Image (spheres, rainbow, N blue to C red):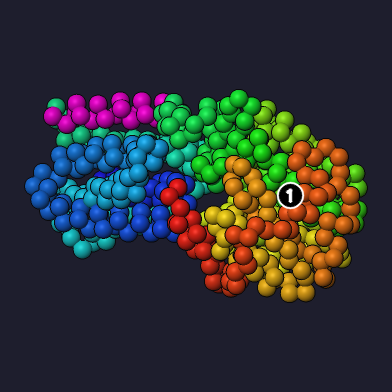
Amino acid sequence: MFAAALLVAVGGIIYELILGTAASSLFGDSVVAFSLATGVTMFGMGIGSLLAVRLARSPGRAFVRNELLLGVLGGSSVLLLFWSYATTDLAWVVFTVLSLLIGIAIGVEIPLLVALLKEHGRDESVSLLSKVLALDYLGALAASLLFPFLLLPTLGLVRTAFAVALLNVLVALFMLGRMGWPVRLTWPTAVVSVLLVAGLVSATALEDAINTRLYVDPVLHYEQSAYQKLVVTTYQGDTRLYLNDQLQFSSVDEARYHETLAHTALTSVAAPTSVAVLGGGDGLLAREVLRYPTVREVVVVDLDPAVTDLGRNDRLVSALNEHALDDPRVEVVNADAFAWLRESDRTFDAVLVDLVDPANERVAKLYSSPFYAMVAAHLRPGGVMSTQATSTYFTPNAFWQVVATMRAAAPDRTVLPLGVNVPSFGEWGFALSLPGDGSQAFAATALPDGLRFHDEASLRATAQLPADAPPRDLAASTLLSPTIHRTYQQDMGRWRY
């Protein structure tokens, strides 16, 4: 029974982590997601602890029933949450209700186990409770290590939920064995076991069915990496990549984005030879850099090896990037861009920053003044830096805060705000950091051949922002005060999607 206490503690913490991770993936704000998952679940645990008093008359049977209920709720939680996100506007409600119900079921467990131990002759209540709680806390440590380093990378969210649910059933089976296999509980246990095993085996098919509802186009690739969900879709020649359900590119118009980010920078430095790409693991930005005959070295630094593997091995994505990641001039580094800059002493003629939008606090450090200062420190004399800076139309405050942060990070440099229309995203913003007065902008190196969208005139036109994107005076975002993600969320909150 002490072993059962350890196992149910492991399962309870993993359920909290599963709910927080799933909500972060869907809603973007991991602080809110994990805060609610933890707070609501623990509130439910308090309710469960109070309810356990009414169940203590027959603690063994009550414990088995509770484990079966928890297995059903926990095992189906991810699918229910993603289904509600794909088909309704009630995903937050479903998330909150699931967190509460799972918390109640977790809260019932320890009081019933203590009652069971007392029923079997363990009467020293203080010593008994301290041992059970010690095992509970040990289980919490085990769960916090198992989930990020083993379960999520190897099983993914859906399979992890079903695997932990089966752990609840195994504990229930142990208790049934201790009680002599009462018929009333044996059949429900068998039914729940079959359902959970079926869910574990068919997890891929179930995920595909939900993804079909999430994405308009057929899903060709689905993967849950240690960091994010990757989905590739295609329809009538339009290949799209989604990370955590957020569109990263459409093959129809991605050239507008990648050509702007790459060529505004590389035409502003004389004969670039060495370029760093921070992010851009799909290889599309590296494709543009390799168009310059003087380039001898491209270092692509992307956190997620699943993305760079996709850029190399997926038939559609590798065709789009023209197999750039297999070019001998390209070095792929799977690392956090912030940590890599801090530890590396390499310098470059240009640094191109192609990171996801600052939608949460984890990404906010990559839009901070210390980050941009580190980038500037890795530039050679005359070197330039460019970054995507969110939408000039949908997130104007976030756009201008990126510009302000770059200026604060390197006040001796000139920062040019840029914009281009990318139909898949709308009006999109970039920022270009140049040495001195910025007079070398677009004038140091000629545009290479092979571009789909830009010519010399259109490239220069990116510096002319539309009249409905006037400059705004905003404070820089820092590590200690990472306001960029809140600015971004407030901007996005003005829209209905």
Q: Is residue 311 above or below residue 352?
A: above
Query: Looking at the image, which residue is at 38% across and 47% down?
Result: 19
Q: As drawn, is 334 to the left or to the right of 185?
A: right
Amino acid type for the residue under numbered disc 1: Thr
Q: Is residue 1 magenta?
A: no
- Tell me which secondary structure the magenta stretch mostly adopts: helix
- Where residue 494 sits in the image (x, y, percent)? 45, 57
- Where residue 329 sits in the image (x, y, percent)? 84, 43
Q: Nearer the viewer, residue 488 or 200?
A: 488
Q: Nearer the viewer, residue 251 or 420?
A: 420
- Where residue 14 sits in the image (x, y, percent)? 39, 47
Q: Is residue 15 above or below residue 476?
A: above
Residue segment shown in magenta:
184-202
- Where residue 85 sits in the image (x, y, percent)? 39, 41
Query: Looking at the image, which residue is at 48% across and 38% down?
Result: 156
Q: Is residue 202 above or below residue 336?
A: above
Q: Quadrant of the N terminus?
A: top left
Which quarter of the figure has residue 213? top left
**SS at mark 1 in the image:** helix
Query: Looking at the image, which residue is at 82% across and 60% down?
Result: 441
Please name the residue that numbered disc 1 is placed on: 260
Q: As drawn, is 267 to the left or to the right of 245?
A: right
Task: Give the class, few, some or many, for how many residues have Cα within 10 Å of label 1's Cα (few <14, many ≥20).
Answer: many
Q: Nearer the viewer, residue 190 or 373?
A: 373
Which quarter of the figure has residue 283? top right
| Residue 344 visible in the picture | no
Q: Is residue 190 magenta?
A: yes
Q: As drawn, is 375 to the left or to the right of 470?
A: right
| Residue 148 visible in the picture | yes
Q: Nearer the viewer, residue 306 or 354?
A: 354
Query: Looking at the image, which residue is at 77% across and 49% down?
Result: 458
